[in-house]
Image: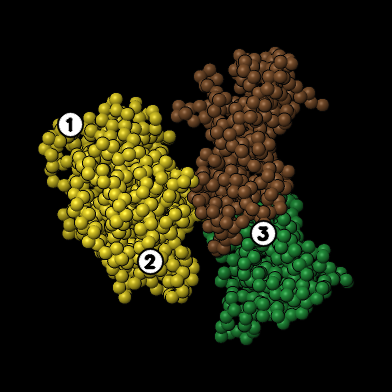
Chain colours: A brown, B yellow, C green
Amino acid sequence: MIDLKELILEKDNLYPLLRKLMKDARLIAPVENEFGDTLFSVIDDIDTTKIDLTNQPQESLKPFFLPQQETVASYTIDEGEYSFTPPPPALQTIFFGVRSCDLTALLYMDLIFSKPVKDATYYDRRNHSLIITLGCNQPFDNCFCEATGSGPYLEYGYGLQFIDLGDCFYVSAGRSKGADLLKKWSYFFREVEEDDQKRRYQLLLEARGQFTKNIQVAHACRKLQKEPVTEEIWEQLSSRCYDCGGCAYVCPTCTCFSVDDTPIDRNSGLRIRSWDACTSSGFTRMTGGDNPIDRSRHALKRRFLHKLKYDFSSHGKASCTGCGRCVDICFGGVDITTFIDLFTKQETV
Amino acid sequence: MTNSIGELVDADVLLITGSNTTETHPQIGRNILEAVDGGAKLLVIDPRKTDIAKQAHIHLALRPGTDIALINAMMRTILDEDLADDLFIAMRTENFIALRDYLHRLNLDELADITGINLDRIREAACIYARSSKSVICYCLGVTQHTCGTANVQAVANLAMLTGNVEKKHSGVDPLRGQNNVQGACDMAALPSVLPGYQNLADNEIRARFEAVWKREIAATPGKSLTEMTHAGKDGAIKAMFIMGENPALSDPHLDPVQETLKHLDFLAVSDIFLTETAQLADVVFPAASFAEKGGTITNSERRVQLCRPAIAPIHNCRPDSHIIMELGKRLGCPGMEFDSDAEIMEEISLLTPIYGGMHYDRLAENFGLQWPCSDRDHPGTEFLHKYYFTRGKGCFTITKHQEPFEKTENEYPFTLVTGRGSYHHFHTATMTRNSKRLVREYPQALLEININDCKKLNLKDGETVELRSKRGAVHITTQITDRVQPGTVFSSFHFFEVPINQLTVDAMDPQSKCPEFKVCSVSLTKVSHD
Amino acid sequence: MNTNFIPERAIIRTIVHENEQISTFRLELINKNVPFTFLPGQFLMLSVPHCGEAAISISSSPEALPLFDLSIRKAGELTLAIHKIQEGDQVGVRGPFGTPFPIEEFASKNLLFIAGGIGLAPLKSVIDHCLFQSSTKEDAAGSITLLYGSRSPSDIAFRQVIELWKKQGVDCRITVDEKDSSWNGNVGLVTDLLSRCATDSNTRSLVCGPPIMIRFVISQLSAMGCDDTAIFTTLERHMKCGMGLCGHCHLDGKLVCIDGPVFSLSQLKRLDVTEFSR
């Protein structure tokens, strides 16, 4: 039986705790760089790095579990002998300051990369990681995690969840790894008091009330099960899709990839897996030129149906986590919220 | 650009001409689409139904090379409908009467005929543009790559001045530059007839200032333009060339004379990041560092000078362009080639170039750079131009007359060939982009856009190889049946060395800008039998 | 054999040049201890040095193991490279992947195979397997008929195999779109051959070829009264993993590499398959 405790960490104890954790594992947390971008970075020196828990990290955890380019094997072809070698094993890593939406995305990725086979490199990284989330007390401009059921706070799935109560963190263990951590470093923590619980609840209610966008995600998902999307909507959206792949690349739950062999020299090379976007025509085009998908009309069809229709029906939940990154990046203004808006307004025939 | 890119979002009317904005200027395209979502009206002038044309409220699909006729028709409509900005014209311009009288003598039906557009549509677009005081014109190479390119731009300027749409925020005339630092290159006078900052080469005082710093005499006579140099021919006066980051063996018009010129040089040196078609002809190749391996500044369409820092050290023996030039300069005995940093080079630029006067590196490091004119350290940069006065004082209306393109269609060459960038995925001669598997996957080969009606007449299928021929040369290319081009017009990109489309284009140039007429030449199409 | 992207090494034992475009490569795993078996209709991800992987249907039947065949048509970089490979060279294979043909359902049924071009390759696996079954079982399948169309006589593949099948009692009818001087057989599309066939509730039809051919044949079979559950095809898609991860073969909520590539018409009709719905 795992004892999933809840404890309080005074803010003064945060860095001392992190310093201890860094001795046995890589620590990755959001850091604001000199250009004003907040990105998940490996913390080398905790004394000179300022961990940024205020701004939304521009990227999700995806680059760490499914890197943009990843060597899944190396091969040699030497005097007729063709052989492959797996990549080196993953490093023990603690991720700190992960938002609820990004953890939800990771849980979704766990599903994708475990059936029908467990993806070796993904699970290697996953088994060597502990995720410490930070619940959002204030949504960012484009967020709608409330509508997707992926925030602002989570009930489960995390290793540990931190809620910022002002002068301290309300810490909940969600998995045995998290519980073990609390046990090992218990002297940094104190017991939860009633006031702490009240404050946490208060903050959650306030956070929920601050979303500026009203995106009807569940409504769209249910409607999609019963009703087809009109061709007009698909064409309207596709006509503004630039084919930049941005949405698929920044999306925490877009996991489609391509695998290509790249020679290093005559006798060796690397088998590289890289992100791919289903919005591109080359994604489905076969050698010989046949393409079952007409991008000019249906560029965005698969992506949106995948996130809101198919995943909703197979997992009971849309795989959009409401992080708002595609809203930020889309050149044509045809992100998932635009689709949800258009479709929910579509008249039922 | 007279505007800043961000101003486009709040314009009420956007007139986009000769620009396939979403495919070639994605960020600017994004601003335009945002403006449209906010209620702005979008007017697009382009012979092709590009992606941005599809979003337009009015798409004026004119016959290639008839921009002046179209704009004259629009201006005449504006006068007829009494929509001209009389106050602006009176206070800020000259030569209006001459233009007005000229426009009144024109026959609108004839003009509409020349453009091939329904006159009512032209009138409608003109009125939409003129009625708003927040109207912006964006233009690109579809306007400039003509033998009347300069006149085309003057016509555009006329239109803007006629309606006073050029002195306030959210209104203006915005050329979208074709490469990320062509603005910067022009600012630094990589041009034959000006000094940095567009200062007058003929002005003795200005030249003296440069001579004092550069410690050598500067000739007062203008040099040659790009096409003049690459078309000098085997007996031309040019004996040697140093070509940096340009691939004229593929990108210049009418390639045969280019090949001849390059092959007959006594000496050719090329500096580039890959062994391009031009580099393959060189006697010496300098491996240059890419954008990721060097520092410096890039000046974009909105005149913003942006600081770039190297992300990685140069790979192998690659050197930044500045190092290559300094080393060459030293060996050629050129004084003043000892700069220890990019910042030091910029200081010399600021000293000699008034519009870059305040562009010091420590300032550029903040706020994503500064927009020129920026005369000194305290100047904040300039968001939009011509707020109170034009550079020459008052704006001058120029009478622009329709001029047929250099080459007309005829029986033997019945189609008009337009060339340009083919898709979102490739850049120019694809020196960089064809090294990306993903980009190549999305657009693997040269395609000839051809209208379905033309295909039916010629009994052509989609994906068929045809011979495309002009008076100057021929290529084999694969067809792509589309409604993007009008019947009688075909379109091809210049990205693929296997289909060197510039074998076919004309080298006729605009007399002032020397810009070649890439946008119009006459071709024939013939089926190629299957092997 | 599902260790993600690392294939098993296989050696090319023999190569049969079917025609200018198609060759059949007979392979054997180098490591004989690796348990490897498959069912007709399944495919492998074939690795060719420096070229990456491609999804290729297995064209032999399981009875031929430890040898297995990949019949490959020249199309792109990888397939062109494999045609330069020689006997004794090594390649890599991962798999088998995909839902096979429901062979158990075909017992004592009359089987009608309709193939166009390279489409005969996956169907061959089924034919060989059924012939083997019927040679060892009393109550085996009913009749086996093959309708096979090619563009021209020089595009016909598996000529020797077809002769062997004829001897084993398979009713083989071949047609070409365009004949040449040597051709004395049928000229026309497979649909013409089909119109001269009879089907009943005991017929099971397996169709494979270019999408347009599949479309017309399926619609003709339906018009002839065949039930949607009695018509099967195998879909082709751009694939990068074969294991349901990469997303390329996603089709209306299903994955062609997992839920297919074999589909019955009744399954297809429940999917938004645009290539058939024109």
Q: Is residue B5 visible?
A: no
Q: Residue at x 64, y 50 (%)?
A: A305
Asked if badge 2 and badge 1 are on a common chain, one would say: yes
In front of the other: A337 or C13: A337
Q: Which mark is residue A89?
A: none
Assign a secondary structure to mark 2: strand
Assign a secondary structure to mark 1: helix
Residue A143 position, x and y percent, is 59, 35
Q: Is residue B183 left or right of residue B311?
A: left
Identity, as a three-letter code, of the amino acid under mark 3: Asp
Q: Which mark is residue C272?
A: 3
Q: Residue at x 11, y 37 (%)?
A: B204
Q: Which mark is residue B489?
A: 2
Q: Which residue is mark 1?
A: B213
Residue A163 position, x and y percent, is 65, 23
From the viewer's perspective, is residue C264 above or below residue C164?
above
